[in-house]
Image (tube, helix red, strand yellow):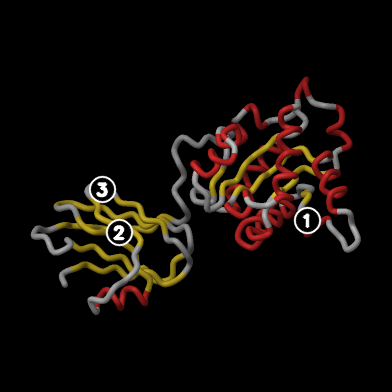
Amino acid sequence: MNYSHYDLKQRQRGDTVEVTLAGNAANVFLVDSSNFSAYKAGRRYTYHGGHAKRSPVHLTVPRSGHWHLIVDLGGHRGTVKHSVRILPGPLKTLSDAPLSTVPSLIQGGAEADASDDVREFDVFISHASEDKDKVVRPLAMALQGAGLKVWYDEFELKIGDSLRRKIDKGLAKSRFGVVVLSKAFLSKGWTNYELDGIITRAISGEQVVLPIWHEITKQEVIDYSPSLADKLARSTANYTVDEIAAEIVEVIRT
């Protein structure tokens, strides 16, 4: 089998591999070590990428580990020259403006509510428990580490607490409502209860809402709530948790 191989070594989830091609179209894809062995042996293998007709090609590393890049012509005749470089972290969409430049996300000024002075929390995080490890806990820790007061269940709930009462208090006394939307979130009752409270307060101007999309498509959000799909959001497919946290911190401190 005629192919070109780049050993990318250990890569982090979200790293972007940029491949520049000159000549014929080619198959450009990532494989982990076990699938690279299967590819070389002519067995079935799983890959990330496809047939590239334009250059450059950007491939996102789907999970941390040892990765290989393959460039081949898929059995066709011709030649293709290529070069590879690693762009740390996911590429952002060019149309995404910093959150701190979006007027609807900024509270304060002449219209600031006097109740801001007695709010106990900067951020309320609404989420499904299935998303704690990958997104929610790292986000909450990053926000808290930056000096924000964060309502997050692991920080606030204690044995014997009334769940509904604590949630209601957190909602009422938070300036910013972060909603981590995922397939698990959309299927749960408690998350819908929290979301209703956040949206109600956002409509009245008492709270700012920022959805974070995690492993969910825009169509799934539209099917769940068309109005929510129209709100400015950040996706974990395009931003790291640390990048999202940094933007939230900047907005709240503006």
Structural crowding at the residue carrying mark 1, measured as other residues with C-alpha within 10 Å and reported as few (<14), some (14–19) or many (≥20) = some
Q: Position of residue 215 (x, y in %)?
A: 52, 53
Compared with residue 94, is residue 51 higher up or lower down, i.e. above or below? below
Q: Which mark is residue 47?
A: none
Q: How many marks?
A: 3
Q: Quarter of the image containing the C terminus?
A: top right
- The Cα atoms of the two marked residues, 3 and 1, are separated by 46 Å
The residue to which callout 3 is attached is 55
Give the labeled residue for mark 2. 84
Q: Residue at x 14, y 53 (%)?
A: 24
* Residue at figure coordinates x 64%, y 63% from the top left: 133
Residue 249, by quadrant, is top right
**Viewer-nearest of discs 2 and 3:** 3
- Identify which amino acid the numbered label 2 is placed on: Val
State which tag comes first along the sequence, 1 or 2: 2
| Residue under numbered circle 1 | 153
Q: Residue 118, percent across and down?
A: 89, 37
